[in-house]
Amino acid sequence: MIYGIVGLRKTEMIPAIRRAAGGQPVREVLRFVRTNRRLSSMFFAYIVVSTFAFNYSVVLPKLADINWGSEDAFGWMLTVTGVGSIAGALVTAKFSRVSLRWLVTAVAVLGASNIAVAFSPNLWVAYLFCLPLGFGGAAMIASGNAISQQESPPDMRGRLLALTAVAFLGSTPIGGPITGLIADYVSLEWSMAYGGVLCFACVAVLAWKWR
């Protein structure tokens, strides 16, 4: 991070366009998202996936303990997921312009990995699928942020990034309790796998919308 800051070239920086005070900034950004097909699709995927498919950090400790008989395995699973996350972020960073297709691909990878980890027969298979789990999650987050910046005019970029953060972080109080209820009343495996199913439903909706 320090290297990146020091390496900034001031001669290539463009002064930001300042928005005039007043008006209705929140309504303006919501209206802009609604009228932009790429942004509305991105936010739809972001909200669905972040609400239901990013609760694996809650489920994995129980899966490791109850299904695979090792509480210590959770730490290793997070380590492997972290390696996948780094790979997903770096691959996304290689694109000069992130496409909606790449975002949908990341959602599909995340969904398939959620299901695969949930029903893994043993710990080593779960470790294997934790790699694409981290890859898909990081690629989706990076893609959403990139698309927000690509599609926004300079005077709206900050508001769009703030809306992206709210869409991702603000959904946790909704998805967490639902995941817990499924674990209690259906099964531990499905409390993780249902997020993967909804990822594929999200992919299907976006494919139909952009057909």
Image (cartoon, grey):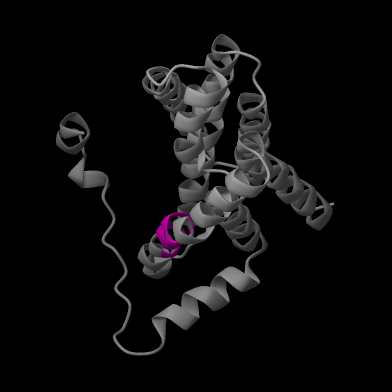
**Is 167 left or right of 208, judged from the image as shown?**
left
Instruction: Give the dominant element type of the magenta stretch: helix, strand or loop.
Output: helix
Q: Residue at x 64, y 34 (%)?
A: 189
- Front in this rendered view, residue 96 or 159: 159
Percent x, y of residue 3: 18, 29
Quadrant location of residue 178? bottom right
Give the residues in magenta: 163-170
Furthest residue in direction bottom, as rendered: 23
Percent x, y of residue 36: 63, 66
Q: Residue at x 29, y 55 (%)?
A: 14
Tell me if residue 175 is in the magenta stretch. no
Q: Residue at x 49, y 31 (%)?
A: 62
Residue 180, placed above or below residue 173? above
Furthest residue in direction top, as rendered: 124
Residue 3, placed above or below residue 210? above
- Front in this rendered view, residue 124 or 2: 124
Whether residue 101 is visible, yes or no, is: no
> In this figure, what is the number of numbered marks?
0
Residue 22, placed above or below residue 102? below
Quarter of the image with the N terminus is top left
**Is 43 left or right of 75, judged from the image as shown?**
right
Q: Residue at x 39, y 68 (%)?
A: 159
Tell me if residue 168 is in the magenta stretch. yes
Percent x, y of residue 60: 49, 31
Whether residue 142 is visible, yes or no, is: yes
**Is 119 left or right of 50, judged from the image as shown?**
right
- Front in this rendered view, residue 94 or 12: 94
